[in-house]
Image: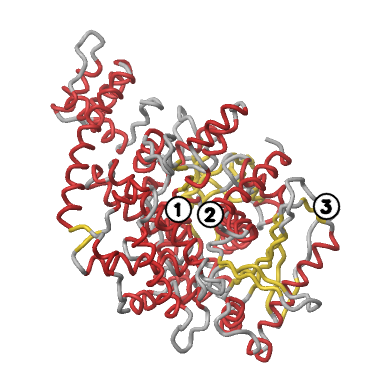
Amino acid sequence: MTVEEFATEFFQDILAEADAEGHFVEDVFFHKFCEHLMEAGELDSADRVAYQGQPGRGIRVDGYGGDPAADDSDTFSLLISDFHPSADVGRLIGSEMNSIFRRLSNFLRHALDLKWRDALEETSPAFGLADLLSKRWSRIGRVRLFLITNRALSERVDGREADELHGRTITYSVWDIGRLYRQATVGHGREDIDVDLAGSFGGPLPVLPAQQPEADHESYLAIMPGRVLAAIYDRWGTRLLEQNVRVFLQHRGKVNKGIRSTIENEPNMFFAYNNGITATAEKVEIEDAAGRLLLRRLKNFQIVNGGQTTASIHSAHRRKVDVSQTFVQMKLSVVDPERANRLVPKISEFANSQNRVSAADFFANHPFHVRMEGFSRRIHAPSQDGTFRQSKWFYERARGQYADARGGLTPAQRKKFDLENPRRQLFTKTDLAKFVNVWEELPHEVSLGAQKNFGAFARRIGQRWKTAPDDFNEAFYREAVAKAIVFKATERLVTDQPWYQGGYRANIVAYAIAKTAHDVRERGQAVDFHDIWRRQAPPPAMGSALNVVAESVHVVLVSPPAGISNVTEWSKKQACWNRVAELVIAWPRPFLNGLISTDERRDLARNARREQRQLNSVEAQIAVVNAGPAFWAAALAWGTEQGLLTPTEVGVLGVAANPAGRTPTERQASRAVEALSKLQSEGYTGELPSGT
């Protein structure tokens, strides 16, 4: 795919989503672009604040990233959009870039002016952002200004030097369509991180080889000076953290206090106390200096464990703490790009650090996501509008699956695909986390943003999967789609209300649905999601009820307590949810009449689990047969050699490995697959062929 083709596809995606969901095109552009920035590690979160000052004043802002107080950071990010309403790749010249940045800089300067802030409407998103900036200014050391555009920045523009404002560093970053294209389509979805230790970070590091002669990859041990690690992190930030570790750390919250205390009070003991970092690189440059190996360069350096350590050292360094006596052990594995997708998750999962990260909880190939994808590809939604045409809800567990599925089709095939898989019924992992978590009464977590909310969701799902995987069955999938239907319908409903003046729609929707879930649960009843699935729409009585609760929720959101003026940040707090949960809502009688009993819902769930267990057995039998006797013979040999198998496991693997034997029973096949999973958890690398 060329950058021009990518730009056209990106533009069409924006128009299609805006049309399907009833959103403004500029809002969709902002959110879709920022999804890529968060995946790239440029931002941890991105909140939309659209403000343009009076004509001629040259003031504009489109959003911001994070709250330094909540993120334990000294950095604040502001964003401005330049959306070109055309599929053609326009050109952004240097003078235009400077003019756009000037508008964003003007907002920053005016936000620090009390008189200017007081002239804004107190409930407006712009006032909330300006007030947040002024309150956090004393702890801010750097402000990053981002320009996002679907035009291509002129090649004559090679950067923009940092400025200062009241002693704070102001940096500028342009993400144009070319940079977005590289991030989204090249390599592993990120631009190269080329760490030149010899040229830019104080010199090469001595290393010790740590692999066996017959090993199929390189491994090294090194001692990383704290000042070098801080400088590298300062240059690339959370892009250094392998994406799933980054999501985990966002969920964990603030910098580890124990690590920080050691850095500040006992830096000479840091190496002894700390477990160090585990890292990967796609390529390294090693120099042999008279028998002494020196690490000069790393390509696509990623920290898969030790993110808290890295962030803590960087934070201390930014606060002028002396880290010259702080040293970190680094275990480095060199993994070629072709094997990275398979090996990096395992390295991340098995490595030890202060906060253990289970990579299986996060990656797109976790069985939960694979199962949801399988349901979405074969389960048709009931037909609507009196037609006989059925459609599917397309679950995109990995970015780009929807576009890839359409990409190789003829025009006629693509038309058929679009009818069966309409874009308005496309949803992603982060969408699913949002749809489910609001019904779990967690609107404050949903308000944290897609990535942080997904981190919390993934941990809960990962733990639940370990103990009750059969809970995630066809009924769960249909209920998840019903929750998506309610969420999307509530978005449209809020937009059409006379009391809605713009801004905070995502928060209003999350809180309105969560409040509905809360009050229904308090009544000892349940929403009939099966009915919503059958209708492919909420019943009219539910729409009326959501209208009532949304208006009440809106009042709470735009009336934060003293000391909090930013509605977006208020919505992220548990205290906000506590206040909404205490609201007394006059629920319309028709809505209450449409609820079902919790016993009824439990019976439905029990039957769904039973059906899923039966389905698992059949699928396991198919998987065993398709993998073939040789596959199972290899697993049996490895497990026997390692002494990991019980007699029963040896028996069922022997049945699967016997080329002349009968087809394993469903129970035997299930036990064989379970034995394989056990071996894989102990380091066996054999995997069932895709499609089995």
Tell me where residue 214 appears, x and y as whole percent. Answer: 45, 27
Q: Quadrant of residue 253?
A: bottom left
Asked if 460 appears above or below 262 in the picture, the reply is: above
Closer mark to the observer between disc 2 and disc 1: 2
Q: In this view, which residue lies farthest toward the bottom?
A: 115
At horizontal 18% and vertical 27% (from top left) the residue drawn is 649
Q: Which mark is residue 21?
A: 2
Secondary structure at numbered mark 2: helix
Closer to the chain start, of discs 3 and 2, is 2
Residue 660 placement, left or right of 259 = left
**C-alpha separation, residue under disc 3 versus residue under disc 1:** 35 Å
Tell me where residue 134 appears, x and y as whole percent. Answer: 60, 84
Residue 556 placement, left or right of 168 = left
Closer to the chain start, of discs 2 and 1, is 2
At horizontal 57% and vertical 63% (from top left) the residue drawn is 230
Q: Which quarter of the figure is the N terminus placed in? A: top right
Residue matched to label 1: 431
